[in-house]
Amino acid sequence: MLSRLMSGSVRNLEREYLCTVRLLDDTEYTCTIQRDAKGQYLFDLICHHLNLLEKDYFGIRYVDPDKQRHWLEFTKSISKQMKSQPPFTLCLRVKFYPPDPAALKEEITRYLVFLQIKRDLYHGRLLCKTSDAAMLAAHILQAEIGDYDPGKHPEGYSSKFQFFPKHSEKLERRIAEIHKTELIGQTPETSELKFLQKAQMLETYGVDPHPCKDVSGNPAFLAFTPFGFVVLQGNKRVHFLKWNEVTKLKFEAKTFHIYANQKEDRKIILTYFAPTPEACKHLWKCGVENQAFYKLEKSSQVRTVSSSNLFFKGSRFRYSGRVAKEVMEQSAKIKREPPEIHRAGLVPSRSCPSITHGPRLSSVPRTRRRAVHISIMEGLESLRDSAHSTPVRSVSHSDCFMSRSRSQATDPGDGTAVISDETYSPSNSVLPTPVAEHSMDLPISRQNNGAPCSIEEEKESEAGTPTAGDVADFSVDSRAKGPAQSLGGEVALSEAEQVNKFVLSVLRLLLVTIGLLFVLLLLLIILTESDLDIAFLRDIRQTPEFEQFHYEYFCPLRRWFACKLRWVGGLLINK
């Protein structure tokens, strides 16, 4: 009896596994799920834990053993998507940035988007001019420690917080000045809302960069935003295509193509090269999902997309969620009592379900499972003394933030748009990261003219993103696929290339046709040699040609196969 119970418990353990999901505030949510559980089940568990209803903007990200990032597909089994062995570690992140985050219905949703954009600012993905950077950081400071208090906040207190990959003492002083004079009396909710409104106007809002190369071998970052597809090179935005202009996304191996129709029926094709085929496929899937989410009116309009022109070649993928318009309509119907958000230094006024956080003392990510409950003043002192929170400074990067307004950013015909006076260079931080303890930060890729690119990939899990060696190999490997054409890789396919593509397509079609004919011939032979009594089969069997084929070819071949099978059977029996 005891042995049966033990064997039963072992079987139950084999059917279950642990999943740890790192949330946006760097806390962790651990649960046990069935081996055949789908991604939607895990996502619903997390949203229930956070008391989150406007959940369509979020997704779960993971990194495979080859350090390639993926979004968890909710319609598929988790264990089949993960290439590693359990327990699994994943991350909750904003997948689709709200076009207007201030218009979100619930404060809990705005708070989570605020945490994501704060991460983007810290990891160098959100670029802005110095004045905007100071205002954003001051709003974060006001939301996390409240009003300036000379008794609690000593001189230089803003330097204890890490808002950007690099910043100078001049910028720190400006942040403290704004916090002391302009934000007095502002609640955390108001500070977060104004932070979101400011961030939304920046040109790199919602950018999740994918490192690639253009046809000339120059490094570039491709990204999908709520407003369209963008290409960033160095300190410039070299391409911007609105979602209604993008007609098709395609990839083959490491090559990614974007087809678009701009004004005056101007058709363009942008071609870029990803580091690996897996990275290219991930880029393509992200593009398909973003285009469906932001462009379509209804989820019923979503269609399965193929990565190739031919149905028998390439990958097929279908976005399975709701589109942005449906999400906003559904959000408008929410009528519940707003859930409480526990913030450091604030006493909850209601006892309803809430999202609970540790002290929000610093923008520096906390180490794994670090739950410290201390006051604001103790937090400042611990930041000063802790080796885990030593702030990083740069002495020369205070004026390298530059951005244009959203109204300028949305003009697709403005050509190359400068987003920074200097190329903004996210630096490697000595601060520990709770989501990438065993990996290195992505190095700065440099263009041929020596200007470093401006966006750094965030480390999302213990497996990490590509190591310095991986990215360096990709940067050094100059795979110039064609002559230097437009700055962002705009390619007008030559007649020779078009002919080659046409010939390859015809050859593929011919091979498939021959294969189908061969299969149909085999099927016809099987049917005619069977005992099926159908009129058209009787007519075929009575023809002289069939009788000749039957006695001269089919019967000898059948006897040969039968002889070989008996010989193999005899060998197996003797053994």
Image (tube, rainbow, N blue to C red):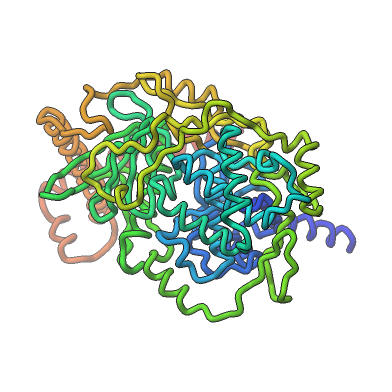
Quarter of the image with the N terminus is bottom right
Q: Is residue 335 left or right of residue 143?
A: left
Residue 133 location, x and y as percent? 51, 44
- Residue in view at x 39 percent, y 64 percent: 324
Q: Is residue 126 left or right of residue 238?
A: right
Q: In this view of the protein, which residue sits in the foreground, 37 or 203?
A: 203
Quarter of the image with the C terminus is top right
Q: In this view of the protein, which residue sits in the foreground, 179 or 407?
A: 179
Among the 4 quarters of the image, the one containing residue 32: bottom right
Residue 396, relative to residue 47: is it above or below?
Answer: above
Residue 514 location, x and y as percent? 19, 41
Q: In this view of the protein, which residue sits in the foreground, 451 or 175?
A: 175
Q: In this view of the protein, which residue sits in the foreground, 486 or 553?
A: 486
Asked if one can make out residue 62 in the rendered structure from this viewpoint, the answer is yes
Among the 4 quarters of the image, the one containing residue 188: bottom right
Q: Is residue 24 left or right of residue 385?
A: left
- Residue in view at x 53 percent, y 22 percent: 469
- Residue in view at x 80 percent, y 43 percent: 381
- Residue in view at x 54 percent, y 81 percent: 335
Q: Residue furthest right?
A: 2
Residue 63 location, x and y as percent? 56, 41
Asked if one can make out residue 572 in the rendered structure from this viewpoint, the answer is no
Residue 206 location, x and y as percent? 44, 50
Number of marks present in the image shown: 0
